[in-house]
Amino acid sequence: MRPYEIMLVLDPKLEGDEEREALLQRLQQVVTDGGGEITKVDPWGKRRLAYEIQGNTEGYYVVMTFRSESAAAQELERVVKLTEEIIRHLLVRLDEK
């Protein structure tokens, strides 16, 4: 298994922590269903964007670190692209430590 990190910028209009938490649980489920394991979930909170994205000037940032096979990481990226509440994302493979 390889280490990955994904940074997500969520729509700030999500209603409360419950909706954000449910969305993150769905994404974590994609990783664990693919045989991966979540290492760390680090919510950064609401921050101002450098430029407007889809009419938003703020976004809720979350960084998630996990270990999985490449197929699970590809499936996670596919799900993220289809999720409207995520306005930006970046998935990178980390170096083995």
Image (cartoon, rainbow, N blue to C red):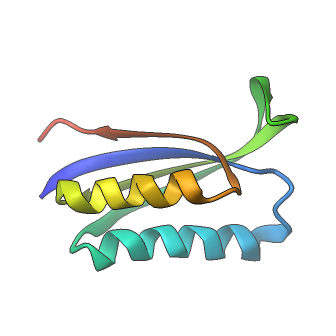
Residue at image position (52%, 74%) is 26
| Vertical placement of residue 42 versus 35, above or below | above
| Vertical placement of residue 20 versus 11, above or below | below
In the displayed structure, does residue 56 sit left or right of residue 91? right
| Vertical placement of residue 47 versus 64, above or below | above
Residue at image position (31%, 75%) is 32
Camera-side residue: 30 or 17?
A: 30
Quadrant where the C terminus sits is top left
Q: Report how many numbered discs are placed on residues in the image.
A: 0
Q: Do we see residue 66 in this rendering?
A: no
In the displayed structure, does residue 53 sit left or right of residue 32? right
Find residue 4 and report its horizontal and vertical position in percent. Answer: 29, 48
In the displayed structure, does residue 60 sit left or right of residue 28? right
Q: Do we see residue 29 in this rendering?
A: yes
Quadrant position of residue 88:
top right
Residue at image position (85%, 37%) is 56
Camera-side residue: 54 or 50?
A: 54
Quadrant position of residue 39:
bottom left
Find residue 91 and report its horizontal and vertical position in percent. Answer: 40, 42
Find residue 6 and report its horizontal and vertical position in percent. Answer: 43, 46
Residue at image position (87%, 35%) is 55
Camera-side residue: 54 or 22?
A: 54
Find residue 47 and report its horizontal and vertical position in percent. Answer: 76, 37
